[in-house]
Image: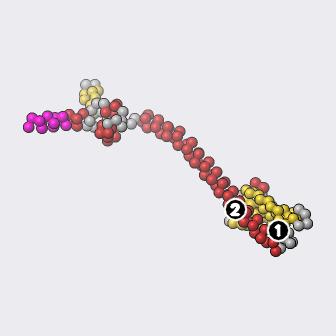
Amino acid sequence: MHGKLKIDNQRTKIENRYAGFTPLENSGVVAGSLFPRIFREIPKRVSISGKKQRFLTGFTLVEVVMASALLIIVIVPILKALTVAQVTGNIIERRTRSLTLAQAKLDEIKARSVYNYSDDFDQDDLFLDGQYLCNVQDAASGSDLRTITVSVGFDLDGDNDLSAGEIEVTLTTLVAKRM
């Protein structure tokens, strides 16, 4: 009986010592070294002008404002970096799609030139896919040789005209007359 009383007294002392703490601080007591020693050593009650009053734990307004300010200082550059990454990703996607479309157009012209070498391949503002436009320039480079230049870009301003600032990819090839 004496042993049980001693264990109950120890348990009561421990429970009284940590009564009134927030769950975060209680978890620090359980977890041991997860929280600094200061969280475990805050007294249960303090004396103010001779009266015992409960000691309230938590964050002050200053601590909350400082934590918010630090959070904002950290989050703003991260959001800016994500925005830059998204814009860069969009540019890379447009250039890749433009390159694919330009290669396909060049392959089409080369295939047509096998049987129709005398045809004129010049085209301006040809729609390829969605808002992608294409300009094709055909120039003679000799009696049996032609220079084909394909420019493809994304119509950013929506005017159905591929201007110099909208061109993403320009490919040039030579096409020879087949005998």
Asked if residue 71 can be seen in this view, the reply is yes
Q: Please check the rendered image and state whether residue 32 is part of the magenta-colored stretch, yes or no.
A: no
Residue under circle 2? 100
**Mark 1 near mark 2, Cβ–Cβ under 8 Å?**
no
Disc 2 marks a residue whose amino acid type is Thr
Q: Residue at x 22, y 37 (%)?
A: 15
| Residue nearest the observer in this picture, 125 or 175 | 175
Q: Secondary structure at mark 2?
A: helix
Which range is magenta? 1-12
Mark identifier at residue 121: 1
Asked if residue 26 can be seen in this view, the reply is no
| 164 shown above or below 136 | above
Q: How many marks?
A: 2
- Mark 1 or 2, nearer chain start: 2
User: Is 32 on the left or on the right of 91, as rendered?
Assistant: left
Q: Position of residue 117 (x, y in %)?
A: 84, 71
